[in-house]
Amino acid sequence: MSKTSISRTVESEEARFAALSANDIETLDPLLEEDLHYVHANGLVENKVEFLRKIRSGERRYRRFSSRSRKVLHEGGFTFVFGEAEIEVFTTRGLVQNVLVYTAIYRDTAHPKLKAWHAAKAFAI
């Protein structure tokens, strides 16, 4: 396990969460792979172009995207993040607030990029 790969990935994920919270497309774009596969907690699947388009157009405006916990593993040329995050986002249906459990896969490079994201609403006990 490479601590360097793991710390670079955590830094990239934190930068991505901050860019989402600020709806900062210019910072967010280079943090995402061109062939991004993004599965939202509601089951909606988007590629990079559609994901960014909805933020750019205002259809989706993030207010907060922050990590609650994460476990990070490095395997081969990828780093896997299994985490929990709190989100607040305005959509065409109004404000959505959730705690998500997620799996994120980053390509291991000098500047890790998100390749895949799959989220589900956390089960409340």
Image: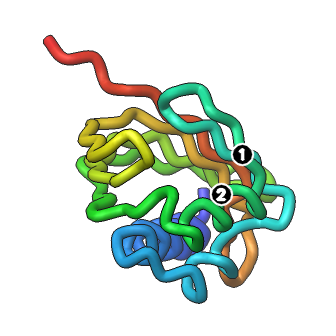
Q: Amino acid at mark 2?
A: Phe
- The residue pinned by badge 1 equals 46
Question: CA–CA distance between discs 2 and 1?
Answer: 6 Å
Q: Residue furthest left?
A: 125
Residue at 59% across, 88% down: 26
- 78 on left or right of 88: right
Q: Is residue 72 visible?
A: yes
User: 62 or 92: nearer the eye?
Assistant: 92
Locate residue 14, reporting x and y percent: 40, 70
Locate residue 6, reporting x and y percent: 53, 64
Quarter of the picture containing the C terminus is top left
- The residue pinned by badge 2 equals 51
Quarter of the picture containing the N terminus is bottom right
Q: How is the image coloured?
A: rainbow
Residue at 65% across, 50% down: 105
Locate residue 41, reporting x and y percent: 48, 31
User: 76 or 15: nearer the eye?
Assistant: 15
Q: Which of the 4 image quarters holds residue 77?
A: bottom right
Locate residue 101, reporting x and y percent: 39, 33
Q: Is residue 17 above or below residue 74?
A: below
Q: Is residue 118 above or below residue 113?
A: above
Asked whether disc 2 touches disc 1, contact meaning CB atoms under 8 Å apart, the reply is yes
Residue at 49% across, 66% down: 58
First along the sequence among labels 2 and 1: 1
Q: Is residue 10 visible?
A: no
Q: Which of the 4 image quarters holds residue 64?
A: bottom left
Q: Amino acid at mark 1?
A: Glu
Q: Is residue 55 above or below residue 70?
A: below
Q: Which mark is residue 24?
A: none
Label 1: element kind: strand
Residue at 69% across, 37% down: 45
